[in-house]
Amino acid sequence: MERIVFIIDDDDQVRISLVRLLSSAGYTVTAFASASLFFCHPLPAQPCCLIVDMTMPVINGFDVVRQLEQRGDALPVIFISGHGTIPMTVQAMKAGAREFFTKPIISEQLLDAVEEALSFAEKNLLSRTERVASTTRLEKLTPREREVLELAIGGLLNKQIATELGISEITAKVHKRRVMDKMEAKTLADLVRVAERLQISRARSR
């Protein structure tokens, strides 16, 4: 999957230099001279990170992070600045920055930070994709199958599920098999992991 690095910096020379560095390292790079231009660009459903200057006019780096969070587009951010101070570094980390660099930036350090940020983004994207797919599968369960799911992840056997629901053991077994099939879980452990991902509570534990 293509991985993308976005850059927001109003300094033309810095922006061009970063594009050249990251492009030469094999990354797909899209750069903007202002945060306003960046926000006009839709974020792709691909692993991506953002390098942003903290001290730009109108919309600074902190404002960019806040707007991203408000939009639900929290992506890994690397802050850069021409005037780094310890308080500014602390503020950047509190804002959720993956890293903070003072210009001029050491190329190797930036490349390492970008790779780490993109790996983080890749894992998050995979997790979100799996959660959406699991939610879609969960919605296909009937109310009875949802009850069976909640009892099964509590560790109840087919006989116990049947007693709990007032149905035959054979019927409970059929419902459980349908739950496993619809949730695409090969084992009970798989089903438990999916339920935990979806924050489904156990109806009862044995």
Image (tube, rainbow, N blue to C red):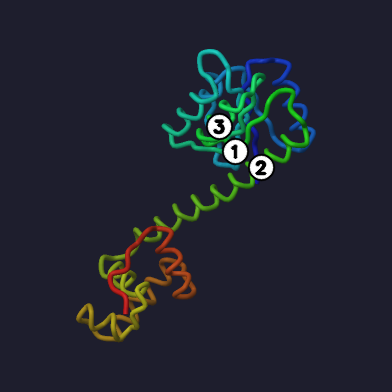
Q: Amino acid at mark 3?
A: Val
Disc on the earlier residue, 2 or 3: 2
User: Horizontal and vertical percent for residue 127?
Assistant: 51, 53
Nearer to us in this view, 17 or 169: 17
Nearer to us in this view, 67 or 47: 67
Q: Disc 2 versus disc 1: distance between alpha carbons?
A: 21 Å
Q: Total of numbered circles in the picture?
A: 3
Residue to which mark 1 is pinned: 98
Q: Residues within 10 Å of mark 1 (few under 14, many from 20)?
A: many
In the image, residue 125 above or below residue 72: below
Q: Amino acid at mark 1?
A: Arg
Front label number (2 vs 1) = 1
Q: Quadrant of residue 89?
A: top right
Quarter of the figure that contains the C terminus: bottom left
Disc on the earlier residue, 2 or 1: 2
Q: What SS does tag 1 mark?
A: loop
Q: Disc 2 versus disc 3: distance between alpha carbons?
A: 32 Å
Q: Residue at x 51, y 25 (%)?
A: 62
Q: Residue at x 62, y 24 (%)?
A: 85
Left or right of 178 in this view: 58: right
Front label number (3 vs 1) = 3
Residue to which mark 3 is pinned: 90
Q: Disc 3 versus disc 1: distance between alpha carbons?
A: 12 Å
Q: Residue at x 64, y 23 (%)?
A: 84
Tell which residue pokes out farthest to the front in this image. Answer: 86
Q: What SS does tag 3 mark?
A: helix
